[in-house]
Amino acid sequence: MKVLSWPRAWERITLYLPLSLMGLLALGTWWLVRNAPQALPAQTQSAPRHEADYYMRDFAVRSFDAEGRLQSVIKGGLARHFPDTDTLEIEQVDIRSTGADGRVMTAIAQRGLSNADGSEVSLLGDAVVERNAPAVAGQRSRPALRLEGQALHAWVEQERVQSHEPVTLIQGGDRVTADTMDYDNKSGVLKMDGNVRGLVQPRRAGAAPR
């Protein structure tokens, strides 16, 4: 039996020591990978729910123009704000708007759906929109224009009212019904389509033209 001297034995040990350490390192790495906790599966982001994030009771929302003049006031008994659409759902909605000519438009309904700044409102259930007639110098004032329906859509700043459901127009003793309507107050254009029926009272002498 050949016996190695200590220096030669240490030389052989140091020769194989790096390989042994690399083997241990590889074995340790394999063990860590095998026993590491598995990553959780990626969770798909759920779509935002149509749920109210705050409520208002017996409230009033006011809008002003660039000069600080009051443009419109939206009141209601109860309002719910929905963050996914940034809209207000209003019960017993009551709107009052003043146009550039100083005339006032009012709107009421059982329920309203308004965008964030109140410039666009859907009026649902016994909806009524009323607009004061313009004053004409030297003529008697005309009665207000009144629109009635179950679904009226109003653009407050544009002074426009539209309906894709049956609607009734009333001004003084005149009464017109139609299946759909588009009224632009600024241009003075009223378009009524479908089954249009009207009752126009005869104008008295000296009365303002309709």
Image (cartoon, rainbow, N blue to C red):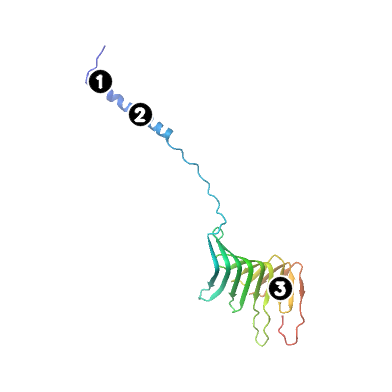
Front one among 25 and 37: 37
Q: Position of residue 40 (x, y in %)?
A: 48, 41
* Other residues around mark 3 within 10 Å, as few (<14) / some (14–19) / many (≥20): many
Q: Which residue is mark 2?
A: 24
Q: Position of residue 36 (x, y in %)?
A: 42, 36
Question: CA–CA distance between discs 3 and 2?
Answer: 91 Å
Q: Residue furthest top?
A: 1
Q: Which label was assigned to residue 169?
A: 3
Picture residue at 43% right of the left edge, 33% below the top? 34
Quadrant of the drawing holding the C terminus:
bottom right
Quadrant of the drawing holding the N terminus:
top left
Q: Which residue is mark 1?
A: 9
For the residues carrying marks 3 and 1, which lies nearer the camera in this image?
3
Above or below, 203 against 195 in this view is below
Picture residue at 59% right of the left edge, 74% below the top? 97
Quadrant of the rendered structure where residue 105 is?
bottom right
Asked whether the residues under the numbered discs 1 and 2 touch, taking CB atoms below 8 Å apart as contact, a structural biologist would say no
Front one among 188 and 210: 210
